[in-house]
Amino acid sequence: MSENKGRRIFGMPVPLFILAVLVVVLLIVGFLAGPIGSQIFQKLFNITLNFPDWLVVKEPEVHLPAPVLFHIGSLGITNTMLATWLTVIFLVVGSYLVTRRLEMVPGRMQAIVEFLFGWLYDFCKEVAGEENGRKFFPVIATIFLFVMFNGWLSLIPGFGPAIYAVVGGEHYELLRGANTDINTPLAIAIVSFLFVWGYGFRVFGFSFFKQYFNFGGIFRGLGQLFTGKLKSGLSTFFSGVVDAFVGMLELLSVFIRIVSFTFRLFGNMLAGEILILIAAFLIPFVLAIPFYGLELLVGFVQALIFGGLTLVFVTLAVTPHETGEV
Amino acid sequence: MDPEGLRVLAAGLAIGLGALGPGIGIGILGYGAMQALARNPEAKGAIQTNMILAIAFAEAIGIYVLIIAIILALL
């Protein structure tokens, strides 16, 4: 019965049309109330539009080092630390609630969580192999979930300048996305570095660190020189020097990796936060919506990158070298 | 030239020049991935995973530059 499709205005069903009208109205109001519209009207037409105070957005101020809100003992608690605790509480309470009554035929919440964990587990096994994937899965899944929910929880409306605390006469926001403070990505990067070296040491013992100090070639070359074999002595000596240099570079690259992890996550999250703040400032109601979508995607991808790269490095660390020289 | 103007100019130059490298790099990565996918559509999972991994490495360089530009412009 084609007449029973519900009423359509302009070819769209009624709720969609109402939504479209609402978006256009908000766009116009936001444009006029924001800085672009008010400047245009002032400069061109000399009209000053006065909007009520709750419609006008103040210019955003970003504090790069996270501000300290209060102290526990001698430890200063910043607003990003509060956000971290919120993420942890969310994850712990969430997992408790989901796993309270596990059933063979899962309900909807359990199915979603099972899908997520199954996908992560398959990813670990695909990169690291069967048994290694199983061993690495807890840490990788923890890193992934922590980073992802740090990013996603910072998008709910309580975070940011809406709720603020007054400390020492200055207004600071009470909650701020945890990944926008450089300490959180640095801490997770150090944890993943210790994880990689810990597993390398556990599988190979002290000879794991021998790959960074490759002086065997130099001594062999010198020994050959002393026993009179000039040509082979020189060639072994020089290739030994190159090997030692490469070993030093590998050691340096391990520490540069920590810095790179930190800045990748920190930069992405900070840029996303500033982007949303400025989009909300320019055209108040509407412009921030596509950037919210982008932030969701970026939070997921960055968490995946962090966990995936840790997984790749730890797999490399426990794989025995197949070449003749270790 | 006054220091304030130079600072903002440095911020603009940093992000402008710094975004060239990662942009081209990610483009080359995408090109390689598309070619590999066209030759061997069955390896889609492996190609996709490795492409995303490599793109994250290339993008991180652009993020370093963004941090410098933000610090120069805002602090």
Image (cartoon, coloured by chain):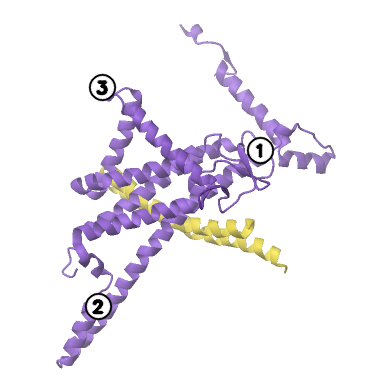
- Residue A111 at x, y percent in the picture: 31, 27
Three-letter amino acid code at the position of disc 2: Phe
Name the residue located 83 percent from the left edge and 39 percent from the top edge. Answer: A45
Does the rendering let one see residue B27? no
Three-letter amino acid code at the position of disc 3: Val
Name the residue located 61 percent from the left edge and 60 percent from the top edge. Answer: B72
* Residue A283 - label: 1
Q: Drawn colour of chain A?
A: purple
Looking at the rendered structure, the secondary structure element under dot 1 is loop
- Residue B18 at x, y percent in the picture: 53, 60
| Dot 1 or dot 3, earlier in sequence | 3
Spatial separation of the CA atoms under disc 1 and disc 3? 47 Å
Q: Which residue is mark 3?
A: A105
Which chain does the numbered disc 2 sit on?
A
Q: Is residue A78 left or right of residue A46?
A: left
Spatial separation of the CA atoms under disc 2 and disc 3? 60 Å
Q: Which residue is mark 2?
A: A215
- Residue A179 at x, y percent in the picture: 48, 47
CB atoms of marks 2 and 1 within 8 Å: no
- Residue A260 at x, y percent in the picture: 42, 58
**Residue in front for this viewpoint, A21 or B10:** B10
Which chain does the numbered disc 1 sit on?
A
Which image quadrant for residue A210? bottom left
Three-letter amino acid code at the position of disc 1: Ile
Looking at the rendered structure, the secondary structure element under dot 3 is loop
